[in-house]
Amino acid sequence: MALTGVLRPGHTQIRVLDLEASVDFYTNTVGLVETGRDKAGRVYLKAWDERDHHSIILRRAERPGTDFYGLKVLDKRTLDKLESDLRAYGVATERWGAGELLETGERVRFEAPTGHLFELYAEKTEVGDGLGYVNPDILIEDRKGISPIRLDHWQIHGGDLDGSRNLFVDVLGFTLTERILAEDGKTDMAVWLTCSNKAHDIAFVRDERNDTSHHAAFLIETWEKLLYAADLLAKRRVTIDIGPLRHGITRGTTIYFFDPSGNRLETFCGGYSFYPDMKPYTWTWDQIGSAIFYHTRELNERFLTVVT
């Protein structure tokens, strides 16, 4: 599958209450690598298999949550075209200059109908994965914590799900892979969208609370490593929301847990491959438990209500 527009989730800025405690958690428990700090006091981190400078930005704030969501596009020409397409669709955009984020080029920022701030960018300094590009090794020794491969996807909540879904499909080139229908059998209560051949790169959930985040997800390699993550989180007394278990949607395996500020994170493994000629899966309201948590077939209250 040729990726010619939006390539992947590239970065996200997370608000934390205690910056140094959060840096310790994200480096030693999650297992990310710190790559820099800027004059504003923000801390930049990456997962071990990511080649760009950062995917996570931590900012100290008075309340937890997510400031914005960055999507990497193929090149500068694509960035310019997508900005033009957004404006033609009626979406206001704003250019942010290169260097406002460390090692990052120009960004085009816009607000989705659900109230979330997104930005598109084409350039970020490549720092590599530590394996080299000629006759590379396959193993990085002494990885810390859970040590995920990459930032994988987001689940975010807001009122105008239809508007955000249509914007991402009609303008940004995403494809619908799965949906949950409301009790009326017609209304989308949640949608899973991909810009690649992953089962999803982003999920929107209909919720009266605009501009809220349910979780950011990190990909890990195997079910065994997911179980190790569960053991490590339990040993370090990290608050686990639920897991390890399997989703019906995407078929991925999962653990949900909280950082010290109350931001929910996910370790995610597996999921099917999706191609543009495939029809999306539809889940009916009476099977929502199986859709989200296939093994238990029920949702806990915290999973339904807690967002930041």
Image: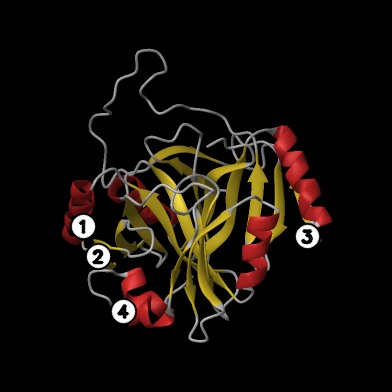
Mark toward the start of the polypeptide (3 vs 2): 3
Q: Residue at x 37, y 25 (%)?
A: 130
Picture mark count: 4
Could you tell me the amino acid type at mark 1?
Answer: Ala
Q: Is residue 155 above or below residue 59?
A: below
Numbered disc in front, either 1 or 4:
4
| SS state under label 1 | helix
Is residue 97 visible from the viewing direction of this image?
A: no
The CA span between labels 3 and 2 is: 39 Å
Numbered disc in front, either 2 or 1:
2
Q: Is residue 213 above or below residue 224?
A: below
Mark toward the start of the polypeptide (3 vs 1): 3
Q: Which mark is residue 91?
A: 3
The CA span between labels 4 and 2 is: 11 Å
Could you tell me the amino acid type at mark 3?
Answer: Val
Q: Is residue 16 above or below residue 43?
A: below
Q: Determine crowd level at label 2: few under 14, some 14-19, many 20+ residues with C-alpha closer than 10 A.
A: some
Could you tell me the amino acid type at mark 2?
Answer: Gly
Is residue 2 visible from the viewing direction of this image?
A: yes
Mark toward the start of the polypeptide (4 vs 2): 2
Q: Which mark is residue 243?
A: 2
